[in-house]
Image (cartoon, rainbow, N blue to C red):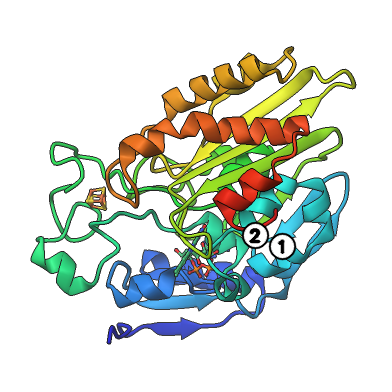
């Protein structure tokens, strides 16, 4: 049995109180929300914080506010996100992403904030302490070599959050709050392409909410590749959000990729290519090729990396055809094993 290391526990009731505790404790403290990522990581000694600051009692983090767009508290569980009619109807891609995270039990515990701040993953890292010790650890934790790219001085562990690419395609922002003040960061700018230092968030900052812009005129979708339909981390996530004119011409488009680098990212050239065009089969194929050229999966997660790269274009095709209005239900069932 893997046991938890010793840790102190703080359970503030407000964001201000949590920020004050983080400022006082320094980087040895970590936030815990649902604990579905952090607890297994602590058991494997990836993270050994001296103090855990629980966000479970912070009611302010559970708000859902409708305005021109939608504001979602970072403490909402993924089940609450999936149950939200506003998310399902206006931000379909994000809803589809949240609905495909892990399993129902994990979505009942896992939060939006935890999903966005999820640790990066790697075959050589997501292992027990004994397993990692047997290979002399690795660059990300306690070692000196990256076993995926031995000449690399940078960890290339994979960003595996489903909600981030969907939120990036929708142009969402997050609010980061610390004892020093607060700032807004676009989800597209929240991540760094570094498997160790993967967030621009500072250790003393709390991600308090996600702000989605008005979705009037936009259609969005998310397609996830994973081995098992029941639950698995993504090995590819394709998110698309497109604003169509009445005659079907693309006014704006954002295409984002997840699980093919240490960060989720926008493929600007894919969106730019579609602007001013109709979603014809030829345009969709060309956009798929542009997006696929940016995917650089590494051999450190499930499924063959060359095949994972090969299918990016097809997944972009599924996403854009769904946005065009094609009936994709059979393909959805084949890939996601559920109607979405
Ligand atoms: C078997 C299994 C399968 C999974 N499959 C998927 C999957 O398919 N897709 C997917 O995306 N995830 C998956 N996960 C990961 C995880 O369950 C979800 O990402 C979940 O949403 C994490 O949220 P949490 O609240 O439990 O995070 P926690 O474990 O509480 O925290 C995760 C990280 O975020 C930080 N954090 C939490 N809240 C905040 C905040 N408000 N501000 C700043 N930092 C914060 C923590 O300090 C920690 O570093 C899986 C996990 C397991 C165990
Ligand atoms: S990518 Fe390399 S350094 Fe990063 S976790 Fe994997 S083996 Fe370790």
**For residue 30, above or below residue 269:** below
In x, y percent, where is residue 87? 78, 54
In x, y percent, where is residue 4? 33, 83
Q: Tell me the residue at 36%/83% (across/down).
A: 7
Relative placement, left or right, of 184 versus 190 is: right
In x, y percent, where is residue 112? 61, 61
Could you say whether the residue bearing mark 2 is in a helix, strand or loop? helix
Q: Tell me the residue at 56%/16% (across/down).
A: 286
The image quadrant of residue 270 is: top right
Tell me if I can see residue 266 in this picture. no
Relative placement, left or right, of 150 versus 267 is: left
The image quadrant of residue 216 is: top right
**For residue 302, above or below residue 74:** above
Question: What residue is pinned by disc 2?
Answer: 99
Could you say whether the residue bearing mark 1 is in a helix, strand or loop? helix
Q: Mark 1: give few (<14), some (14-19) or many (20+) Cα within 10 Å.
A: some
- Residue extending furthest toward the top: 276
Q: Tell me the residue at 57%/50% (across/down).
A: 334
**For residue 318, above or below residue 40:** above
Count of labels shown?
A: 2
Relative placement, left or right, of 336 versus 125 is: right
In x, y percent, where is residue 306? 32, 35
Quarter containing the N terminus: bottom left
Q: Tell me the residue at 64%/69% (across/down).
A: 16
Question: What residue is pinned by disc 1?
Answer: 82
The residues bearing labels 2 and 1 have C-alpha atoms spaced at a distance of 6 Å
Residues under numbered marks 2 and 1 in contact, where contact means CB atoms less than 8 Å apart:
yes
Label drawn at residue 136? none
Q: Mark 2: give few (<14), some (14-19) or many (20+) Cα within 10 Å.
A: many
**Closest to the observer, 298 or 317:** 317
């Amino acid at each position: 049995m893997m046991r938890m290391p010793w840790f102190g526990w703080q359970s503030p009731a407000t964001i201000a109180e949590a920020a004050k505790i983080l400022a006082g404790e320094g980087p040895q403290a970590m936030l815990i929300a649902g604990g579905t990522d952090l607890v297994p990581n602590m058991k494997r000694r990836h993270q050994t914080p001296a103090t855990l600051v629980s966000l479970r009692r912070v009611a302010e983090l559970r708000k859902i506010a409708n305005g021109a767009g939608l504001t979602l508290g970072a403490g909402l569980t993924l089940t609450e996100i999936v149950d939200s009619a506003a998310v399902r109807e206006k931000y379909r891609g994000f809803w589809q992403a949240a609905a495909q995270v892990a399993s129902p039990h994990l979505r009942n515990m896992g939060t939006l904030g935890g999903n966005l701040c999820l640790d990066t993953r790697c075959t050589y890292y997501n292992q027990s302490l004994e397993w990692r010790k047997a290979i002399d650890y690795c660059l990300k934790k306690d070692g000196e070599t990256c076993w995926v790219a031995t000449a690399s001085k940078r960890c290339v562990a994979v960003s595996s959050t489903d909600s981030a690419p969907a939120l990036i395609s929708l142009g969402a922002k997050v609010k980061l709050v610390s004892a020093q003040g607060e700032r807004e960061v676009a989800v597209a700018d929240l991540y760094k392409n570094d498997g160790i230092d993967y967030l621009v968030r500072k250790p003393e900052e709390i991600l308090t909410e996600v702000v989605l812009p008005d979705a009037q005129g936009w259609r969005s979708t998310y397609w996830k590749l994973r081995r098992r339909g029941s639950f698995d981390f993504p090995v590819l996530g394709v998110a698309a959000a497109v604003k169509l004119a009445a005659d079907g011409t693309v006014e704006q488009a954002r295409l984002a990729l997840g699980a093919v680098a240490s960060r989720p990212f926008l493929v600007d050239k894919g969106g730019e290519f579609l602007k001013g065009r109709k979603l014809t089969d030829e345009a969709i194929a060309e956009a798929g090729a542009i997006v696929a050229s940016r995917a650089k999966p590494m051999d450190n997660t499930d499924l063959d990396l060359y095949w994972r790269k090969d299918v990016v274009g097809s997944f972009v095709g599924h996403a854009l055809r769904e946005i065009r209005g094609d009936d994709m239900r059979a393909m959805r069932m084949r890939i996601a094993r559920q109607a979405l």
